Structure formats: structure tokens, C-alpha cells
Amino acid sequence: MATQQTRSIGRIAVAPSVIALFLWMIVPLAMTIWFSFLRYNLLDPNPACSLMTPGALMDEANRCLAGTSNYTYFLTDPAFFKAMRNSLMLVFWVLVISVTGGTMLALLLDQAIYGRNFVRLLVIAPFFVMPTVSALVWKNMMMHPVQGFLAWITKSLGLGAIDWFAHYPMTAIVIMVSWQWLPFATLIILTALQSFDEEQKEAAQMDGTPPISFFWYMVIPHLARPVTVVILIETIFLLNVFAEIYVTGSGGRAGNLPFLVYHYGLLANDIGGASAGGIIAVILANIVAFFLMRMIGKNLEA
Amino acid sequence: MGTISLRNVRKAFGDAVIIPGADLDIEHGEFVVFVGPSGCGKSTLLRLIAGLEDLTSGLIMIDGEDVSDVPPARRGLAMVFQSYALYPHMSVRNNIAFGLKMAGMPKEEIDAKVTHAAATLNLTDYLDRKPRQLSGGQRQRVAIGRAIVRQPKCFLLDEPLSNLDAALRVNMRVEIMQLHRQLDATMIYVTHDQVEAMTMADRIVVLNKGEIEQVGSPLDIYNKPNSVFVAGFIGSPKMNLITGPLATKFSATTLGIRPEHVELLASAGDVNGSIVLTEHLGSDSFLHVDCGEAGRLTVRAAGDYEGKPGDAVSLGFDRARIHRFDSQGKVLV
Ligand SMILES: Nc1ncnc2c1ncn2[C@@H]1O[C@H](COP(=O)(O)OP(=O)(O)OP(=O)(O)O)[C@@H](O)[C@H]1O
Ligand SMILES: [Mg+2]
């Protein structure tokens, strides 16, 4: 029970960090919004249209202010729809693979198997690998059509090699990112499995519950909440996947929304357009988050 | 029917022998209470009967059939757990129905049974709630409901009331006893509370470190404890256990006498002492009397006893009610 006094002291105590965080977020966001309304291109021979030179901006207001044209351009760009689709496909498939795979791995690791601690360590390992490193390893060691491990397997089976990044870039990215996120799902679900009440298990045993029914009626409902957490957190991160696409050079066909923003800003040097794309991505992410919360948020209520 | 027999039942976890060898026969319709201090193996013994633990050696028979290798669900028993172990995401109705559903019973039959059980246990209004929306006592009733719909030969209850407050515990105690009479089923009830054991049991099984110390009706056990352990464990306040010269005078290693069998005399009793503390319960008063070498004895006096701490008293023992134990702690006759 906080008294009036402790509550106001609490507020004062957290104020500096709240203010710092607020500035930390609000300044870049404000600048992005500002840029998104400018005709601000680094290839412009007269690069006056930036926040840094407000005087020039005023002089050339007519030329610099873009109105909403950056937005309409971005939203009507065919690349935008492709990027959207790629973003959603990536999120969807990685979620499917990491949640089902994570559940199965967690069920396995929950058993008293031989060398369990070592296997656990192995399972967690991918989570510690940087996305750039993982992308390089997958591209050059696993999926390379000539020297890759997967190619070696398929070739020794007499099937020939697959050039993953040339023919199935989206599938390759999904596999890579799933590999990275599987440990996270496994860990959370494993923790949940281990907190399953022993007496409840025994009650089910007394009730004569066969394993399949036990899984269906007891384990799955018990996992609903941790899986919700996994889906929420992974979605947030998966919408932002960039390094894997950039490093493997799959942006052309498997590029998602962040990659398109990168393309606008750093390949086309169109700061205004990239900012508009960034703002659109933020809005879309919030819409997704809103629906996710609505759909599965009720699982999180106590 | 619901007779249960244990023959030389042994249980060890690794090197730790928890039940060194138990023999017991339980008749149909009996209310048997396992009582003993914490960690003495009551739950383990119950779980062995349920089939939740494997026997190390020995035999368990239900209705004369060896069930040592029969899985729990097929032994025809139902268990009520200390933590209730309700299925948290199922409604009360589904909690009660789940075992029947797993047994493949037709839906109409399940519904009829659940309705009937709910009526018996006053749960009709709560059938569509989740366990977390119930009070402790209601959860307890759901756990019992889950057990009774299966019409088991025997109910196993592991400290079912220990999570309830004192008043509710007394109510539920009465309800369970009524239920026992109504269902005419065998019940094995585990508790470490000797008051529960005394009030509920047809027969009490006193356990000490995994050994069955004594089996008998509550009054039998109260009046004729066959060891120091049972004498000290059953009865509240505890029986006075006296060692030393005073016990030797009665030719025993340990002399036991219950507080209500000690008489306050003006002089020339078996032992003299001074009052240290008086507890007035209204109906009775309990005096703690320091008797020097004989130790501190508890004595029951009338509710309006007026003695004060510091008063000297002389205590006389009721000769017919003394208990004498040998150096092994066994009773001498
Ligand atoms: N799975 C196990 N592995 C090893 N030892 C165990 C196991 N289960 C129980 N024990 C031990 O067996 C002994 C008896 O345990 P049990 O649970 O039967 O006690 P209890 O009489 O029910 O006590 P309480 O009144 O506290 O519930 C304890 O010493 C306990 O440590
Ligand atoms: Mg116990």
C-alpha cells in the first residue's frame, strides 16, 4: 500500500529515467516525422532542405516542403506491397516454426534424457549468435550450393544441390531466422512445462488420462500463456529483421519493410521518402500489435 | 466392496528406506486415518496404495486381487490431493466430469452424475466457474466431487483440510464424515493432526518413521497406547512422560500419565511440585507443575481452579490409568 507521500517520492525518483527515455524516443521520432514531409534527397545538388539549415529552408519553403507526397509515393510504390507481403510471410512462418518446433523440443528436453544439460546448451546456442554472423554462416557454410553442408547432404543422396539464395531466398531467410528464434520459444515453453503442477499430473493419472489427451486437455491450455508471450515478443522483433536479408543479399526478392526503408534512404538517397516509409512501418507495427493484443491479450489476463 | 490389504509393503527411494515393511488390513466401509509426524511416510504409503509410487517389494491387494502392477486409474480408487490439484483451465463441471470422460462414459450419463454430485456437495451454482473463482472450501468440495463421481471402491485423502482455516476445517470434517456414511465407501485419510484422527476415524493407524506403530480404534489408542511414541503423539495436551527415579518406583523406564488422570491433593501425593503456569480454558484449567526431578507435568483441574503460579501442590496418580513403558519404549503389562 503506497501512501500519498511515497507515491509522489516514487514519481520524482523515476522522473529522470522517464524523461531520458522520452527524449531518447521522441527526438528521433520527431525528426523522422519532420523529414518525412520534406523533399530531402542527398543527391539533390542544392542540399539545403534539412533541419540543420532552417534559414535556407525558409527561403526555399516552396521547393523543400513536400506535403504528403513522400507518403503517397511510398504507399503506391509496387515495392511497398512486395515488402509488406515479405514482412508478413516472414513473421508468420517463423512464428509457426519456432512455436511448434519449440514446443516439441521443450517436451523432449523436459524428459529425463541422457546428457540433458548438454543438449539444453546446444539448443540455446543459436540465440547467442549475432544475426550478421548467423547470416554469413548460413549463406557460406550451410546453404552454399557448392561448399554448403546442405548441398553436401543432398548431393551425397544423389539429388543435386539447391542454390537457396538464388532460387528460394524467402525460404532460406525463414529457415535462418527460425533457427535463431527457436531457442527463445523453447526456453520459455520449457520453463512453463517445468512449472506444471506435479499433483495435477498425478490427478490426471488417477483419472486415467492417456498421453494424447493429457497433452491436449492439460498441457496445451497450460502453455497458452507462455506461447502468447512468445508470439508477442517474436512478432515485435521479426517485423524488424534486417541483417539477415542485407548480409545474404536477398533484399531484391525477400526484402521486407525495414529493407525497403533502407533501400529508399541509403541506396536511393531519398531521406524524405525513407522517413515516410519508416513512419508507415511504425504505424503498421502498431496496428499489428493492437490486433495481436486484442486477439491473444485475453490469455494474459490473470 | 472395498477391502485393502498390504502385505510386507516396502518402499525405498534409492538408499533411503521410507517404509521398511507395512502390513495392514482395511475392511469395506471403514474410515481409516493414517496419522504421524511430518515426514513419517504417510503420504508415501497412501501413494503406494494409489499406485502413484511403485512398490520396492511386497504386495497390495484390493478386494483380494493383487494390484501391485495395475496402473492407478484401474485400481478403482479416487484421490483427493492436499493442494486439490484441480485442472485450472476447466470449469467445475469439466473438472468433475473429466475422469468419466476419459473412461469413455456416454455424455448423458456423465451429466447426470455431475449434476447429482454437485447437488450432494452444494456446488450446483458454481458448475460453470473456474477453480480460481472459488473459495478454498469450494475448491475442496470440487476435489471431493471429482472423486465421488467415479464411484471408487476406496477414497484416498491426503491432508485434504490442511489448507483451510480452522472454522472451515471443522465444517468440512463433519461433511466428510457424513459423506462417508452416505456413500458407504472405504476411506483412507491422511493427517498429522491427531484431533482430526481422533474425531473422524473408525480406526487409527499411527506411523512412526515409516513403521506402523499401532492400529486401533481412537479410544483404544488413547487408552492403551502400546509405545511411548503413540502415548506422546495422541492426546492433547500431551501425556506426561516421566523418566528417572519416579518411573523406577513404578518399575518402568518411562511412566506415562495423562493430565486428566492426575489428581491434586492437599499433601502426600506421588510427587510434589509448584505451579509454574495456569491455562484457563473455561471448562478446564491446565496447570504446568514443576516437580523437580520428575520434570514438568501437566495437570487438568476444574475450570474454576484458583491456584496461582508459585503455589505448592501435591499430585496423585490414578493407579488404574498409569502407563508403564520399558527401555525400548514398549508398553509393560
Ligand atoms: N520422491 C522422493 N524421493 C526421495 N525421498 C522422498 C520422495 N518422496 C518422499 N520422500 C521422503 O520420504 C519421507 C516421507 O515422506 P512423506 O511425504 O510420505 O511424508 P508425510 O508423512 O506425508 O509428511 P507430511 O505430513 O509432511 O506430508 C520424507 O523423509 C521424504 O523426504
Ligand atoms: Mg504428506
Image (spheres, coloured by chain):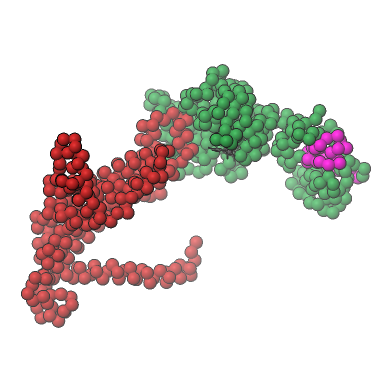
Q: Is residue A92 shown left or right of residue B266?
A: left
B281 part of magenta stretch: no
* Colour chain B appears in: green
Q: Which residues are magenta?
A: B240-266
* Colour chain A appears in: red
Q: Is residue B76 visible?
A: no
Q: Residue lying furthest right in this view?
A: B268
Location of the N terminus of chain B by quadrant is top right
B255 part of magenta stretch: yes
Using the image, determine if residue B195 lies above or below residue A279: above
Query: Which residue is depicted at the point 11% across and 70% down?
Result: A41
Residue B54: image location, x then y, percent: 52, 29
Q: Is residue B66 shown left or right of residue A46?
A: right
Image-quadrant location for residue A285: bottom left
Q: Is residue B57 shown left or right of residue A108?
A: right
Location of the C terminus of chain B by quadrant is top right
Query: Which residue is depicted at the point 69% across and 30% down?
Result: B214
Residue A256: image location, x then y, percent: 17, 54
Ligand 1 is found in the corner quadrant, namely top right
Using the image, determine if residue A83 lies above or below residue A58: above
Query: Which residue is depicted at the point 24% across and 67% down?
Result: A29
Residue B108: image location, x then y, percent: 39, 25
- Nearer the observer, A112 or B52: A112
